[in-house]
Image: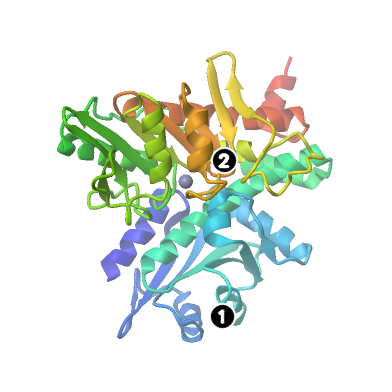
């Protein structure tokens, strides 16, 4: 068990959410196992475990940009009296609901928050943010909550900055803080992974390509490992099958989590296949694509939440029904990515209805507040390149919009552009 806990802690550090040693994870069996011994937080965790009915508990101190955005959001949530961070993205809506904020590292306050939600943010006496999360049955649940909380707070911070600039409610203090936060962003990766060349004609080759592309998507920070999905249409002679990741599987560990579903539906592991299987199937039926990749790249999600129509009567319902056609477009490179509403799954507002018609003839589509779907004609090289290209453009476009709205008094770009 200790090795498993250590692996989750190492994954958090590898994805830049904590420093090595930043996460303490406990699993409760006959005795308590830890991912590391002699950590001063163990006494607090033991008191917290005694108050909760759970099998695993995580206490982590986020680092870098995640520390900055969480501490800022938590400070504001305590100041305005809501004690809640309420991001507008899909992971939060479907998985976290909202994020309670607790003042001080006390087992009583944290137990109260964890009685209501899977995880909470704690602001300690020195103003640093921590995350507490539990797993009802497994330590993996606590790990997933920690990753999702970091993603949600990142999105919430940058989306709120742009919205408050548009609303004219930005303060000088927050502008300065924003410049500091921005300087903590990890540099963007520009190198491309070496992915297998298609078309793949055997199930083994397709499986290997899916496993490889899924792992690269997580490694490049384009999705948290337990979200996103991926599929390949294997079409050769009599064979016409979609190989798709299972719902809830980790994109960086797909070896045992790929379901074959025949296009004619004569056999399908539909019970375990991704909840977005109907959307994948409809996309394959409507076009020539052979590969679909779906990630949650941060700035694509943030930009999809940005809307100029401040008096829109549909506010709050954007993820279900947005009447205004929207897109992310770069005339210079020809990039043209529609943004569509769509809920997870197959309901009346499901993305299985909105996504397939929008993606026809496009490289990809952003689902509002949720993530990006991209296509490959024969393999994942094209789909992965589009995922990276769209995210890079969205990141640049985000800071262009922020600068145009006067959001970065001390930012790098405004300093550079004011030089003669
Ligand atoms: Zn998704």
Between marks 1 and 2, how big is the CA–CA gap? 34 Å
Residue in view at x 18 percent, y 34 percent: 205
| Residue identified by numbered label 2 | 301
| Residue identified by numbered label 1 | 107
Q: Is mark 2 within 8 Å of ligand 1?
A: no
Q: Quadrant of the N terminus?
A: bottom left
Dot 1 or dot 2: first in sequence order is 1
Q: Residues within 10 Å of mark 1 (few under 14, many from 20)?
A: some
Quadrant in the picture for residue 329: top right
Query: Residue 153: percent from the left, percent from the top?
Result: 59, 53
Query: Residue 19: percent from the left, percent from the top?
Result: 45, 55
Asked if 128 appears above or below 319 in the picture, the reply is below
**Residue 27 visible in this rendered orientation of the protein:** yes
**Residue 191 visible in this rendered orientation of the protein:** no
- For the residue labelled by badge 2, is the local secondary structure a helix, a strand or a loop? helix
Kindly check if marks 1 and 2 are in contact, taking CB atoms under 8 A apart as contact.
no
Quadrant in the picture for residue 124: bottom right
Q: Nearer the viewer, residue 86 or 267?
A: 267
**Residue 61: mark in rendering:** none
Quadrant in the picture for residue 377: top left
Q: Nearer the viewer, residue 388 or 365?
A: 365
Of circles 1 and 2, the one toward us is 2
Asked if 330 appears above or below 139 in the picture, the reply is above
In the image, 140: left or right of 318? Answer: left
């Amino acid at each position: 068990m200790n090795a498993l806990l250590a692996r989750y802690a190492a994954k958090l550090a590898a994805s830049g959410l904590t420093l090595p040693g930043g996460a303490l994870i406990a699993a409760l069996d006959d005795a308590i196992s830890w991912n590391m011994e002699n950590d001063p937080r163990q006494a607090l965790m033991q008191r917290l475990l005694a108050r909760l009915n759970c099998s695993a508990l995580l206490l982590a101190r986020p680092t870098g940009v995640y520390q900055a955005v969480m501490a800022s959001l938590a400070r504001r949530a305590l100041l305005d009296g809501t004690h809640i961070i309420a991001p507008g993205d899909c992971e939060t809506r479907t998985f976290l609901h909202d994020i309670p904020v607790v003042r001080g590292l006390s087992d009583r306050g944290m137990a109260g928050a964890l009685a209501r939600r899977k995880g909470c943010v704690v602001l300690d006496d020195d103003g640093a943010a921590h995350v507490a999360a539990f797993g009802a049955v497994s330590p993996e649940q606590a790990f997933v909550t920690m990753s999702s909380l970091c993603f949600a707070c990142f999105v919430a911070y940058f989306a709120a900055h742009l919205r408050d600039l548009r609303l004219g409610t930005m303060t000088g203090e927050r502008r300065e803080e924003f410049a500091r936060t921005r300087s903590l962003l990890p540099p963007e990766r520009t190198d491309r992974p070496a992915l297998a060349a298609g078309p793949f004609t055997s199930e083994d080759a397709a499986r290997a390509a899916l496993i490889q592309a899924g792992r690269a998507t997580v490694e490049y920070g384009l999705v948290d490992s337990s979200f996103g999905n991926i599929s390949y249409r294997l079409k050769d002679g009599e064979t016409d099958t979609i190989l798709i990741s299972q719902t809830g599987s980790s994109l960086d560990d797909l070896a045992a989590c790929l379901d074959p579903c025949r296009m004619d539906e004569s056999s399908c592991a539909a019970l375990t296949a991704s909840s977005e299987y109907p959307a994948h199937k409809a996309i394959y039926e409507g076009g020539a694509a052979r590969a679909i990749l779906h990630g949650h790249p941060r700035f694509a999600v943030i930009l999809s939440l940005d809307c100029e129509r401040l008096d829109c009567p549909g506010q709050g319902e954007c993820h279900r029904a947005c009447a205004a056609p929207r897109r992310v477009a770069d005339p210079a490179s020809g990039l043209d990515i529609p943004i569509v509403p769509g809920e997870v799954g197959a309901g009346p507002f499901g993305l299985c209805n909105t996504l397939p018609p929008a993606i026809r003839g496009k490289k990809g589509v952003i689902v509002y507040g949720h993530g990006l779907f991209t296509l490959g004609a024969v393999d994942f090289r094209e789909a992965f390149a589009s995922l990276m290209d769209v995210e890079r453009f969205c990141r640049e476009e985000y800071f262009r919009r922020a600068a145009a709205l006067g959001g970065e008094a001390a930012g790098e770009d405004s300093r550079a552009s004011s030089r003669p």
